Amino acid sequence: QQQQQQRQGSEAAVAEDRQHDGSTQCGNTNTKSLTKAEKEEEDVCVSKKDERLRHIHFLGTGSAIPSKLRNVTAIILTRGIYVNDQGETVFEAQEHTNNSTIDGGVDVDGKEGNGVASMLFDCGEGTYGQLVRKFGTASIDRILRSLRVVHISHLHADHHLGATTILRHRRDAFARVGVAETPLVVIAPSFFYYFMRHTLHLTMDNSVYIDSSLFRNGEQALLSRKSVVSDKVLRLYADAKASLGVAAVDVPLVKHCLHAFGLVLTFTDGFKFVWSGDTRPADSLVHAGMNANVLVHEATFETALQDEAIAKRHSTAGEAAQVARRMRAQHLILTHFSQRYKVSVGYEKRAACAFDLMSVDLDNVQAITGLNDTIDVLFAANDSDEGVAEGKKEKKGRGGDSDMKKKKWKEEKKKKWKENNKKKNNTKK
């Protein structure tokens, strides 16, 4: 109830702001220039707003390798699932109709159509462990059964190496309730399919794979390729979209490595979400995500390290902010930070910096953009506390002067070695 009240309050504030600047709920269209028919269409769009809560949960916000504070990249989008103020995972109830599994698989009792669904954006190593930490051991099976789509942006290991574990545990989660596994839809570069075939003995995977390049000219290009994509795959794809409340998917090619893609989701109520993947600033992403409500963009380097970002085909925090401005995105969240940064890469105005296990209500993103300084203080305090604890531990274990003892021990050992060599030489003589 608190979540819904906060959401209603934020919606009222956003509606008031948009009324002030002449924008509407389903886009940035100026109401003064709308015809009567267009205004009626806008009213219908607003009335169809998705009532189920949509959240993104950051399971990993670092790049390349895991560190103490940041795991490698993974984000899960949930519809009808959130974590409340007490840290409990809540699954929103939904009336089941027509005995269809379109709305999210099964619940813990094995009943179909519980009205919840989720989608993974990338799946670096350790993603399953992060899911358990975020949602708890009691809820992890339901989270895995709610998973309908996985999007792999590109084939660097820090973005896909956790997929095998996720698929294996998902299969087990269905088996524990005695329900047939709902096939997972995997949208990824074509070579990812061949990689997963080599781990088939571990996962017993029955997922369906869609090559990201088939979206190159938009979703319609995919839907028209029936000679390449079977009717079964297209049906499962349509069911998965419906369970997530998604009307359209776009997978634009971006500038990183060979076969690197971003992701644009347009929901049935007009809400637009964009995930950049790893990339340099890309016109294709800007065009596909124009007027986005939320943009999650990589910011591997601080703004001052642009040359290094260019060399490694990543973006700086400043460049991510420029992409958001060009895209006319309402909100920007930065992620995928180099592990050299303990806290952040430096903040851009009106941008939020993600950290591991952070949850964001997509309809209330503005609530987190003012918390950057507070988050920095918390990270700094944590680092300071751990430093003190490590110092006490070392002092307790070594008697308070471990370095001196170690140095003295080495000198004595070296002295004995010289004496032994001298005795050997004298014996030979």
Image: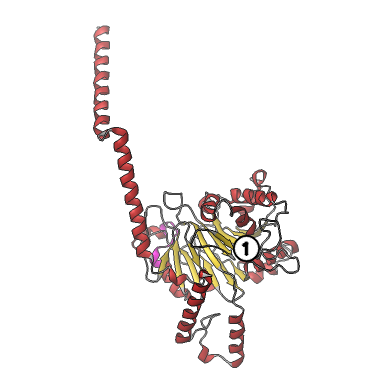
- Horizontal placement of 370 versus 182: left or right? left
- Residue 353 belongs to the span the image colors magenta: no
Query: Residue 23 versus residue 429: which sits nearer the camera?
Result: 23
Give neighbour class at mark 1: few <14, some 14-19, many 20+ (Cα, 10 Å).
Answer: many
Residue 233 position in % (x across, y down):
71, 61
Q: Is residue 409 above or below residue 192?
A: above
Query: Residue 267 versus residue 146: which sits nearer the camera?
Result: 146
Q: Amino acid at mark 1?
A: Ala
Q: Which residues lie in the magenta part?
A: 310-319
- Horizontal placement of 176 versus 420: left or right? right
Display colour scheme: secondary structure
Q: Is residue 388 above or below residue 410?
A: below
> Looking at the figure, which quarter contains the N terminus?
bottom right
> Looking at the figure, which quarter contains the C terminus?
top left
Residue 302 visible in the displayed image: no
- Horizontal placement of 418 versus 31: left or right? left
Query: Residue 377 versus residue 305: which sits nearer the camera?
Result: 377
In the rendered image, which residue does mark 1 sit on? 117
Residue 211 position in % (x across, y down):
64, 60
Residue at horizontal 68 percent and vertical 55 percent from the top: 207
- Horizontal placement of 179 versus 276: left or right? right
Q: Is residue 95 above or below residue 108?
A: below
